[in-house]
Image (cartoon, rainbow, N blue to C red):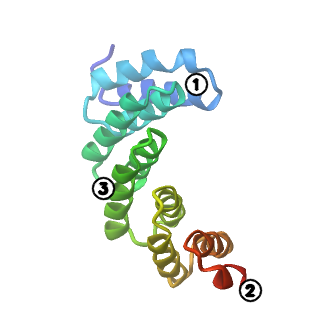
Amino acid sequence: TSDSPYASFGYGYKARVAMEEQRWEDVIVPLKTAQAMNPRQDMVYDWLGLYYFQKNSLDLALLNFRKAYRYCSFDDSRHLMKAALTLYQMGRLEESAKTYQFIRKRFPKEGDLYTNLLMTYELLGRPEEAIGLVEKAMRLDPPPYADDYALSLGLAYYLAGRYEEAIAP
């Protein structure tokens, strides 16, 4: 290894290229090397989370996405979004919804947030909360993913038994 503070970035990006090229066997050694060299580098934990998510080691993916958020030097939702999605994949829907709600309070214009939280509420059997969420998202300026929300709103109305509203244009 090197004493250079930039060496960990080189190892990290070597792993990132391997990930993008789907060469998963070439990912873990450079990531672990980068982590050992700079144990507070948020992107290394993010990439470790992606690696473990790909390998279906969801507990490790979640752990690393949470560490990425903890070590991130700027206020950003991306690590938390990945943690919430991982919780969703694990079937831990209540925790996923709480994480998405935390993100919504801190980053209200995060477009993917509303779609993901909507799906979580639908699976939890809480369509009325999904409806309120979509209506809030559509009032954002500009509304992210407006066409997707119209479809999601129709589905949420249907799940809530509000059939007339579900089919209204």
Observer-nearest of 63 and 149: 149
Residue at image position (35%, 64%) is 101
Classify mark 3: helix, strand or loop: loop
Which image quadrant for residue 100? bottom left
Few, some or many residues within 10 Å of mark 2 (<14, 14–19, 20+):
few
Indicate the position of residue 72 as horizontal and vertical percent values: 30, 47
Classify mark 1: helix, strand or loop: helix
**Quadrant of the frame with the N terminus:** top left
Q: What amino acid type is highlighted by mark number 2?
A: Pro
Indicate the position of residue 164 as horizontal and vertical percent values: 67, 85
Q: What amino acid type is highlighted by mark number 3?
A: Phe
Observer-nearest of 46 and 157: 157
Mark on residue 18?
1
Few, some or many residues within 10 Å of mark 1 (<14, 14–19, 20+):
some
**Quadrant of the frame with the C terminus:** bottom right
Classify mark 2: helix, strand or loop: loop
Indicate the position of residue 42 as horizontal and vertical percent values: 33, 40
